[in-house]
Amino acid sequence: MKLGKQTTLRKTVTLLGAGVHSNAPVSLVLHPASANTGIVFRRTGLPDGGDRRIEAKWSKVSTTELCTVIGDPSRGTVATIEHLLAALAGLGVDNVTVEIDGPEVPIMDGSAWAFVAAIDRVGLETLSASRRHLKVLKPIRVDHGRSFSELSPCDKGFRLDVEIDYASGVIGRQHKALLLTPSSFRAEIARARTFGSIADVERLWKMGFALGSSLENSIAVDGDRVLNPEGLRSADEFVSHKMLDAVGDLALAGAPIIGTYRAFCPGHRMNVAVLQAMFADRTSFEMVEAPSRARSFYADFGLPAMPAFAEMN
């Protein structure tokens, strides 16, 4: 696979919205960043008046209960990062500093489309440094009940293969597979909205969550009916959104993946768990890049500077 150059944004761009769980207003500013910065959040608006730098990496995940959250709860976190990360990964943006003044990335319309539009407004800049890729060398799988998530080798790029199965007749069993490119992300995944049953939303309201959830940012399912007046954006919007979440969560690998992600009824916990399993087994992946950068990558994740294939058993 031909390796390209790293990218960042041409200009700063700002989005305003509210968090889906807190319903608190939030300002999100995407800043250009230099090569090898990666995706880094700068959390402002903290009680102590300071700010916190939080890298968008699997090792920084603090919870995956209702969404993906990174950071230390005692010092500052950022929640619901998956749709923004999906937009950045799907469009091939490698380096960005995300300045955010609240605890949640704004939900916008419940998909990644607002973030795609913001990135398109300012455009991308190609940097001189080579892009780093994570190449999966052998299958890594995690199971939880009937659900599973798996990463396996694929030399063609990053392929996703997702299946879901819900009791609701309007969702049912859906399957979708594609090779992730900026074009396929825009056309097949980016506009798919988050969804949930009205009973679950009412339960979360009573618990103090999903306070910003509405028909403007979520697909509401009541039995075998979709309550949104406009209906679905596509017949496979439910499985497409699960794929969107996976793209965002797997971006926490810290580099674009060369491999296949296959899952049945996945969620944020399963997506992060398969990354944890991969990084726990150094024989399961390697970096595809110039040799001079390999040592730096392993150091980034606190791993010994060794090739992934050194201890094949």
Image: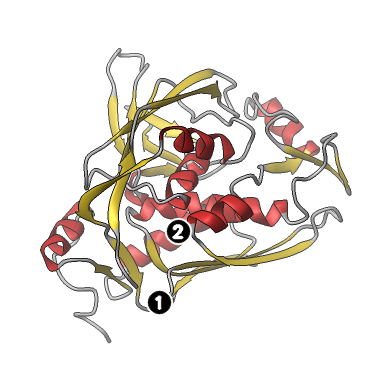
Kind of residue sitting beneath label 1:
Asp
Residue positioned 49% across, 20% down in the render? 26
144 above or below 119? Answer: below
Q: Measured from the top left, where is residue 129 in percent x and y?
A: 20, 53
Q: Measured from the top left, where is residue 296 in percent x and y?
A: 14, 56
**271 or 65: which is nearer to us?**
271
Distance (Cα) linking label 1 and label 2? 23 Å
Q: Measured from the top left, where is residue 180 in percent x and y?
A: 50, 61
Residue positioned 59% across, 28% down in the render? 21
101 above or below 277? Answer: above
**208 or 278: which is nearer to us?**
278
Q: Measured from the top left, where is residue 273 in percent x and y?
A: 45, 58
In the current view of this chain or complex, which residue is farthest to the left?
A: 292
Say the numbered circle drawn on residue 213: none
Kind of residue sitting beneath label 2:
Ala
In the current view of this chain or complex, which residue is farthest to the right?
A: 224
How was the colour assigned to the protein in this rendering? secondary structure
Say the numbered circle drawn on residue 155: 1
**116 or 309: which is nearer to us?**
116
Q: Is residue 260 left or right of residue 211?
A: left
The residue tagged with tag 2: helix, strand or loop? helix
User: Dot 1 surroundings within 10 Å: few (below 14), some, or many (20 or more)?
Assistant: few
- Rendered-image quadrant of the N terminus: bottom left
The first of marks 1 and 2 along the sequence is: 1
Residue 118 seen: yes
Q: Is residue 6 left or right of residue 206?
A: left
The residue tagged with tag 1: helix, strand or loop? loop
Residue 74 seen: no
Residue denoted by label 2: 273
